[in-house]
């Protein structure tokens, strides 16, 4: 017997995926600028901190992933480990860039990570929490690698401030999404691995953004 509720949800999800993808495609070009200080390397502690706060927010791919990792975490009992793994790995990724070690296809993997995490939320993934934390950390390396571009050549004070800034803003956004996922907009009806319909719709929307971003990276 066909489950019409799940079928309707899948159809609606695909529509949301396509609609969000189209919107994200229109916004991709300006969003990928990824530099809140206009390509100027921060030279003071305050400038470094503000640049760190801005980088994950002005990049559509970074912002979407940070929100998504918080929402995915909300579906797990010990889900808070996901955003923590992500931000720690992002620091490591920035260090890789500052060490002048090349990570090929970094922007592609960042965009693909947005698509993947959106689908994980939308489809109610049963992947163990520990495995999801490892995947979040893997994505964090590439996101952090991209963050490193904005601080190359900076002295110690603005560099430390930049790291503090982007770590702080990512934790605030991810934990805010986690709180909303647990308590707001009826997400509280979700059980571990089985997100509510509202959370699934958010997953489809994020996946649509990831699809458009990945498409733009493939086309170059």
Image (cartoon, rainbow, N blue to C red):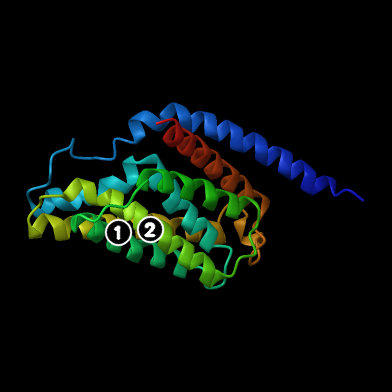
| Residue 165 percent location from the top left of the image | 24, 56
Q: Nearer the viewer, residue 92 or 206?
A: 92
Q: Secondary structure at mark 2?
A: helix
Q: Who's the residue at 17% across and 37% down the image?
A: 39
Q: Is residue 201 left or right of residue 7?
A: left
Q: In the rendered structure, which disc, 2 or 1, sits on the residue that comes first in sequence? A: 1
Q: Is residue 95 left or right of residue 128?
A: left
| Residue 219 percent location from the top left of the image | 44, 30
Q: Secondary structure at mark 1?
A: helix
Q: Nearer the viewer, residue 150 or 201?
A: 150
Q: CA distance from mark 2 to mark 1?
A: 7 Å
Q: Which residue is mark 1?
A: 93
Image height of 74 relative to 211, above or below: below
Q: Who's the residue at 36% across and 53% down the image?
A: 142
Determine the image quadrant of residue 54. Answer: top left
Q: Badge 2 local density, few (<14 within 10 Å), some, or many (20+)?
A: many
Label placed on residue 3? none
Q: Which residue is mark 2?
A: 140
Quadrant location of the C terminus? top left
* Farthest top residue in view: 26
Q: Is residue 175 left or right of residue 3?
A: left
Image height of 44 relative to 25, above or below: below
| Residue 84 percent location from the top left of the image | 39, 67
Image height of 61 relative to 28, above or below: below
* Farthest right residue in view: 1
Q: Badge 1 local density, few (<14 within 10 Å), some, or many (20+)?
A: many
* For the residues bearing labels 2 and 1, Cβ distance under 8 angstroms: yes
| Residue 72 percent location from the top left of the image | 54, 59
């Amino acid at each position: 017997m066909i489950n019409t509720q799940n079928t309707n949800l899948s159809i609606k999800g695909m529509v949301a995926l396509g609609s969000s993808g189209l919107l994200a495609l229109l916004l991709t070009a300006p969003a990928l600028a990824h530099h809140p200080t206009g390509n100027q390397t921060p030279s003071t502690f305050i400038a470094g901190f503000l640049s760190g706060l801005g980088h994950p927010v002005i990049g559509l791919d970074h912002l979407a992933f940070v929100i998504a990792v918080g929402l995915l975490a909300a579906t797990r009992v010990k889900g808070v480990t996901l955003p923590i793994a992500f931000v720690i790995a992002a620091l490591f990724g920035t260090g890789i860039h500052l060490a002048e070690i090349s990570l090929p296809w970094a922007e592609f993997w960042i965009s693909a990570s947005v698509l993947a995490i959106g689908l994980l939320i939308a489809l109610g993934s049963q992947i163990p929490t520990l495995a999801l934390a490892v995947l979040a950390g893997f994505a964090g390396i590439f996101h952090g690698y991209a963050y490193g571009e904005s601080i190359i050549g900076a002295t110690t004070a603005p560099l430390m401030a930049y790291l503090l800034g982007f770590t702080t803003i990512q934790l605030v956004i991810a934990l805010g999404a986690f709180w909303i996922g647990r308590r707001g907009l009826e997400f509280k009806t979700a059980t571990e691995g089985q997100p509510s319909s509202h959370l699934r719709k958010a997953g489809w929307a994020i996946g649509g953004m990831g699809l458009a971003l990945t498409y733009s990276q493939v086309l170059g």
